[in-house]
Amino acid sequence: MSAQPGPAAFERIAPVVPVRDLAAALARYGRLGFATERYGGGPGYGFVSRGAVELHLTEWAEHDPLRTGAVVYLYVSDADAVHAEWAAADPPGRLTGPVDTPYGLREFGYVDPDGTLHRVGSPLGR
């Protein structure tokens, strides 16, 4: 990817992920080692963060995990260590084992009950 010069620098991103039950989602992310916070300015919105990674959660009554699920990719320093931590937390949903990819990453996937696929990867050879 080549960078295009622009008038302002992009500094961070916070994807907004739909959930059916905000309290359950915040608890689930807490089990996965994220700091969690419910937005105080109104119902149905929250934040989860871990290190420099931040996701926003929005409770959406029309959310259907089979049609409106999300995908986020989390780059980490050690995918195996994160996988071991998440496996020990035994979150609801589906957790796949780590694999080496042909594109140079060690990665695994976690699909939560809201249909969000979390792809987690770290560079091979670290």
Image (spheres, rainbow, N blue to C red):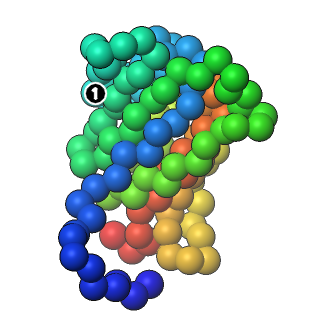
Q: Secondary structure at mark 1?
A: strand
Image point 66% across, 38% down: which residue?
69
Mark 1 — residue?
35
Q: Nearer the viewer, residue 115 or 57?
A: 57
Rendered location of residue 38, percent (x, y): 33, 17
Rendered location of residue 113, percent (x, y): 65, 25
Q: Quadrant of the C terminus?
A: bottom left
Q: Amino acid at mark 1?
A: Ala
- Farthest front residue in view: 7
Image point 34% across, 52% down: which residue?
13
Question: Going by the image, does 59 lie left or right of 49?
Answer: right
From this view, report whether residue 21 is shown above or below residue 7. Answer: above
Question: Going by the image, does 45 lie left or right of 24?
Answer: left
Q: Nearer the viewer, residue 52 or 100?
A: 52
Rendered location of residue 36, percent (x, y): 31, 23
Image point 34% across, 85% down: which residue?
4
Q: Nearer the viewer, residue 102 or 45?
A: 45
Name the quadrant containing residue 32: top left
